[in-house]
Each structure stands twice: as structure tokens, then as C-alpha cells.
Image (cartoon, helix red, strand yellow):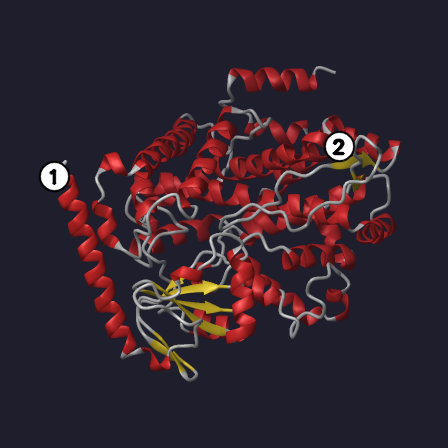
Amino acid sequence: MLNTQLLLVLAGLAFLFLTAKKWITRRHTNQTLPPSPPPLPLLGNLHIFPTKDVHYQFTKWARQYGEIYTLYLGPTTAIVLTSPLAIQQILEKNSALTSDRPDNYIARLVTGDDHNLVLAHYTDTWRSLRRGAHGILTAQACLDHLAIQQAEAVQLSHDLLTDPGGFATSIRRYSFSVIMSVLYGKRVPRYASPEATALFKMLELWVNILSPGAHPLIEMFPALRCIPGPFASWRRLCKKVRIIQRQLYFGLLDEVEARSDQGNGNGCFMETVCARAQEWGLDRELTGYLGGVLIEAGSDTTSAFIQTLVLLLVAHPQVQRKAQVELDAVVGTDRMPILEDLEDLPYVRAVILETHRYRPVAPLAVPHAATAGFNYGQYTIPKGAILFVNTYGVFHDETIFKDPETYNPSRFLENPEKEKLLDLAFGAGRRVCPGMNLARNSIAINTMNLLWGFDFMKARDATGAMIEPDVWDYSEGVATCPNPFKCDINPRSRHHEEIVRRDFIASRDAFLPFEHNLSASDKAFIREQWKD
């Protein structure tokens, strides 16, 4: 007990010494840093740093302190960017200096040193992972997998016919099944599939670990890493997540390798990664984590967008009706839309853009870090600074978008030049989302399908009164999603329902190549699904 107490005291003293040293040093060098809220000695701005809805507070500060401002987080300096110009100049023009990530001790405990493509430092290991991701997720490669993506989208529409109340889980299944099929050549036919159960359990734990308050501020105060195991429950949680991740990631990789060895490959992306791993500088450990992190990121973000779309359609029926008029004129009612229709549907495209703008899935993205100091105008960006990209703040800047708190897709028809700004929804600089092409295809296909086939209406309570959807009720995290909400989903007509059922039956051949190595329960589910 004495040794433990002594260790904690020493860690506390080390923390105070290092924080005081950095504070004194910073006082002499911060004359050219961007403005900041008034800091306290040692703490800096930690006492006012928000514990929830961070992007809202960051946006309020941006209106007060400008497009670029500083937050002093104990010994750490953070710079918040809230304008297209600042983001372009700092993250694009100076990308060689701003493509790092802040140190993430928790991520290293879970995945190992720099094995996570999203959170890894800007090193040769990250470059190898990025090379692999870019090699398989090109625009053309994603088009080559459009058949399974379209088939899974048809199943999503079919699922809404059979279980409209379970729309959120149906959307999550769709999103995960697409990324699984494309990456690993194995689909997920139901929400309760073993791989889906493992992934969603792991993601829930992962989000809990990374949430504020789940662990000490280890990155800001490294001395806290010395806290003994019995006093660090977060260490046990990290170990649990690591076990689930590795079982899922490397189990899927084993299946891909076994199919390839037997000559039964189906052209999935991970077959290409395995074949070119040496060329891209990937050992088996990195190969396993590359695929795993891509399914983790891809399934979560696309699902969040589609759920946001449903929420906003329920809240804004006039937008829904206008999009349906356009779809009826261009596509008609005798077939479901296809990706090629999108270019002839300017209002539907505007709905997609406005959904990105109004409720970006990643309102603050994943922070960058500066590997060297440099200047931006009159300000200094110091080495080691955390760089927050306030995507939400840019998208809700009234000097860029008139009436930013109004959901109005027509703004992109009136000012089409603003569309390019929406690329920020997928990140900035060298850290832009590698799965952007696949995600855009999924978003487009499902936006068209859902608007074409269904009416999304406000639910009613036991008294018959309409339940108003809360468009502000969102989960916390890097990727945000509407919290569970109720709505009524009905096919637009009996004819639309028949077309969805017809196209679902026609999708059977597209599913077959991706139904290898399914669990016995999944095989039984599929037999039941097709027995009629």
C-alpha cells in the first residue's frame, strides 16, 4: 500500500512540475498564438472545456474569437480552425507539417503502435496503411462492386417493408454488410449475425473508452500512465476491446486467406491487399488492422448519415414531397432508382448535400497535430499543437450559408458553387477519409431508394397526437448519430411495395458470391427468407 501511495504522490508531483514548466515557457512564447478564452494558471482553459456537445461550444467561441483561436488544455496547446481558408492553408497547404495525430495512449493499448489507420501517427507505418487503403478504395474499384452495394440497398428497402419499426437496426445492418462484402467478400444478412454482434459490441465499448471521463487525461498528463492496474479500470476495458477486435479482424482475414488458397476468391478488396501486401509494406498484423479499421469506420459513418436523413425527412415533409416529385418525373414508378439517375436529380443531390451540412456525421472530425511550428498570417502554429477542424462551425457559418439553422436543400440549387465546401464532411488534408467513394455511393443509392419508395411521417402517441422529432438529440463521439426516435414508415403505394419485393427477389444472384462461410444461423435465416 505504501509503495502504491508513494507512486501516486510522485506521479502527481511530476505532473505539477511538468505542467508548471510548460506554463511558464508558454507565457513567454504565446504572444503570436491565436486569441483564446481567458486561461487560468496551470489549468489553462480546462475548467471551461465542454464535456458534451463540444462542437456547439467550439462554434460559439469561433463567433467570439475568430476563424482560428487557441485553447490551453493544461500543458497542451490546441488550435481550433473554423473557416475554409484556415483549414485550406493549414491542413492542405501545410499538410506535410499537419498530418500527424495527437498521441493516443488508449488507442495504442488497444491496437498496438500505429496500427489504427485513423489514429496512427504520421509515420512510414501510416503511409503503408494509407497506400493499401487508397489502392483498394479508388472510385473505379468501388464502381466494380456496385452490384452488391445496390443489392444490399434493395434489402434495406425490403426490411423497411417487413419491419419499419426496426429501421435503425436495418440501416446499421445495411451499412456493415456493404463494407463487409466489399472488403472481405462476406455479407451480413441480418442484424443478429455473429460478425455484426461482435462489431457493434466492440464499437459500444470503444466509444465508452474514448468518451470524456472514461479515463484520466493521459495524453495531456503522461505521468498518469503510472497509475497501478487496480486503480485503472480503463486498462481492463482496453484489454477487452483488444480481444474482441483481434478475434473479429483476424478471423475475417483467416477466411479470406483460406478462400484464396483454395481458389475460391470472389474479388473482394482484402484479397488484393493480401496479394500486394509486400509491395505496400504491410505485414500480416498491419493487414489485419487495415481491414478491421475500415469496416469499423465505414459501417458507423454511413449508418449515421442515413439515420440522420430519415430524421430530417420526418421533420421536413415538404422537402420529402419535393424530392419525390422529382424522382417520379425522372425515374417513374416502375423501377427503383440506380446510381446513374443521380445526375438527373438535382434536388435529391441537394438533399444529400444539405444533410451533410446541417448535421455532419463528424462535426469535429479527428484532430490533427503539428509536427513543426509555422506561421499562418500573423499567428504562430506551434510544434505539437492539436488542430481541431470545426466542420460544424464552418457549415453553420451565416457568412457562408444564409440561415444556417434552417434545413433548406434549395440553397445548393441557388448557389451550386457552395457544393465544394461539403467535401469537408469527409475530412481535410492528407487525412481525408479513404472510403469516401464507397460512402458517397451508399449515401446516393439509399437516399434515392428511400425517397422513391417510402413516406416518412411523424409517429403518434397513445392519444393520437403527433410526436415532434428532436433534430438536436444526438449521441456523443467523433461520429454522431441521432439517438433513437420514433417515426412511421409506409410504402408510397402498393405498386411501390411490389417493385421493392420484385427487385429484392432479383437481387438473389448478386448476394450468392458473398454468402460463403456464413454461420449456421445465418444460413437458416437465408433459407427462411427465400422459401417463398
Q: Secondary structure at mark 2?
A: helix
Work out whether 508 lies above or below 145: above
Residue 178 vs residue 430: left or right?
right
* Number of the label disc, if any, that sits on residue 503: 2
Residue 62 vs residue 451: left or right?
left
- For badge 1, the amino acid type reads Leu
Closest to the camera, between mark 1 and mark 2, is 1
The spot of residue 306 in percent (x, y) is 65, 45
Q: Toward which corner of the image does residue 111 lie, by quadrant?
A: top left
Residue 154 vs residue 87: left or right?
right
Sequence-first disc among 1 and 2: 1
Mark 1 lies on residue:
2
Taking the spot 77% from the left edge, 59% from the top edge, the residue there is 346
Residue 103 vs residue 208: left or right?
left
Label 1, label 2: how far apart the Cα atoms are: 70 Å
**Residue 395 visible in the displayed image:** yes
The spot of residue 453 in percent (x, y) is 80, 39
The spot of residue 350 in percent (x, y) is 73, 59
Q: Toward which corner of the image does residue 19 lie, by quadrant?
A: bottom left
